[in-house]
Amino acid sequence: QTQMLIKQIQIQIQIQTILIQIHHLKILIQTQILIRIQTQIRMLIKVLPTITAIQVQVLLLLKLKNTLE
C-alpha cells in the first residue's frame, strides 16, 4: 500500500516536472519570437525613411510629367 502511494507520488512529481519544462520551453520560444519581431521592426524603421523619400520622388516625377504633357 505504502509502496503504491510512493510510486503515485513519484509519477505526479515527474508529471509536474515535465509540465514545468514545457512551460519554460513555451517562454523560451515566445522570447525568441519577440526578439525576431523586434529585429524586423528595427530593420523596417531603418528602411522607412528611404521608402518615404522614394515615394515623394515618384510623386514629384508624376507631377512633373503631368506638367510637361
Image (cartoon, helix red, strand yellow):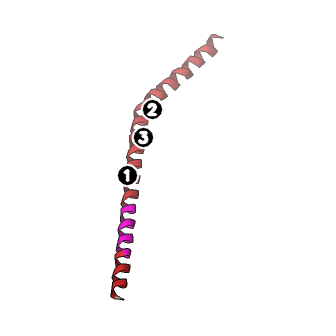
User: Amino acid type of disc 2?
Assistant: Leu
Residue span colored magenta: 11-23
Kind of residue sitting beneath label 1: Thr
Q: Residue furthest right?
A: 69
Q: Residue 31 carries which label?
A: 1
Q: Residue at x 43, y 30 (%)?
A: 49
Q: Residue at x 42, y 44 (%)?
A: 37
As for residue 20 lying within the magenta part, the answer is yes
31 left or right of 56?
left
Q: Helix, strand, or loop for circle 2?
A: helix
Q: Which residue was labeled with disc 3?
A: 41
Q: Who's the residue at 49% across and 23% down the image?
A: 54
User: Disc 3 marks which amino acid?
Assistant: Ile
Q: Name the residue under label 2.
A: 48
* Mark 1 in CB contact with mark 3 (< 8 angstroms): no
**How many C-alpha atoms fall within 10 Å of the one at disc 1: few (<14), some, or many (≥20)?**
few
Residue 40, quarter of picture: top left
Q: Position of residue 22 (x, y in %)?
A: 40, 61
Q: As displayed, is residue 68 above or below residue 4? A: above
